[in-house]
Image: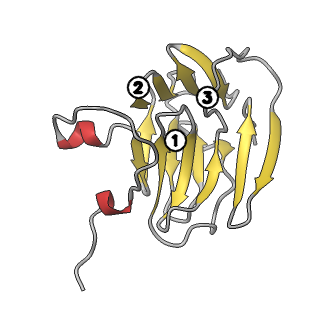
Amino acid sequence: MALMSAAAYIPLVCACSMMLTSYVEAFSNVLLQRSTMFSGQYLAEGPYQFKMQEDCNLVVYNNGQPIWATDTGGLGRDCEFRLKSNGNAVLYTGYDKPLFESKTADMNNGAHYIIMQCDGNVVMYTAEGSPIWATMTNGKVQVIDLGTPPTPTVNSTSSAVIKSVKGGRSL
């Protein structure tokens, strides 16, 4: 049996019109398992960015305005956001101190990925396309204060539990 490429696992999550000019550009909105976003790097889709900032804050932007954050700014240096093979996404300082995590370890069923969707939501999906974590920023246009205290939420659906964080959460 032939192995499927990573691209075969990525479902069509919304009908965005975009012109793909290269392989790299085609995946500029996806973070695959065992991948890392370093300071200054981001996922982008339309007016939205999911950015690992230099100050160690992981932020979702809509047209340059923050709409979600981990509230970890200033807590470290040389931070990295890693999508681990066990299904957990963790923001680490340069000294490997965890500052934020998705708390989705062992919820995946093989290949999984995080995608910056064209509706503004950042979602982690399993290989079968089930969402297991999200920022819940779909359609959000209001600007948030990056200093607001975190408010964790848990939403459940009939097929999966989606763990989300509004405003961010630190460990």
Residue 86, x across and y down, in percent? 55, 65
Q: Determine the CA span between mark 1 and mark 2.
A: 21 Å
Q: Earlier in the sequence, mark 1 or mark 3?
A: 1
Quadrant containing the C terminus in the rendered view: top right
Q: Residue at x 68, y 64 (%)?
A: 160
Q: Work out whether 120 lies above or below 47.
A: below
Image height of 84 relative to 116, above or below: below
Quadrant in the rendering for residue 36: top left
Q: Amino acid at mark 1?
A: Phe
User: Mark on residue 139?
Assistant: 3
How far apart in space, not on screen, are marks 1 and 3 (Cα)?
24 Å
Instruction: Determine the residue positioned at 45% across, 21% down.
Output: 47
- Residue 19 found in image quarter: top left
**Foreground label between 1 and 2:** 2
Question: Residue at label 1?
Answer: 81
- 67 relative to 34 in the view: left or right: right
**Which residue corresponds to mark 2?**
46
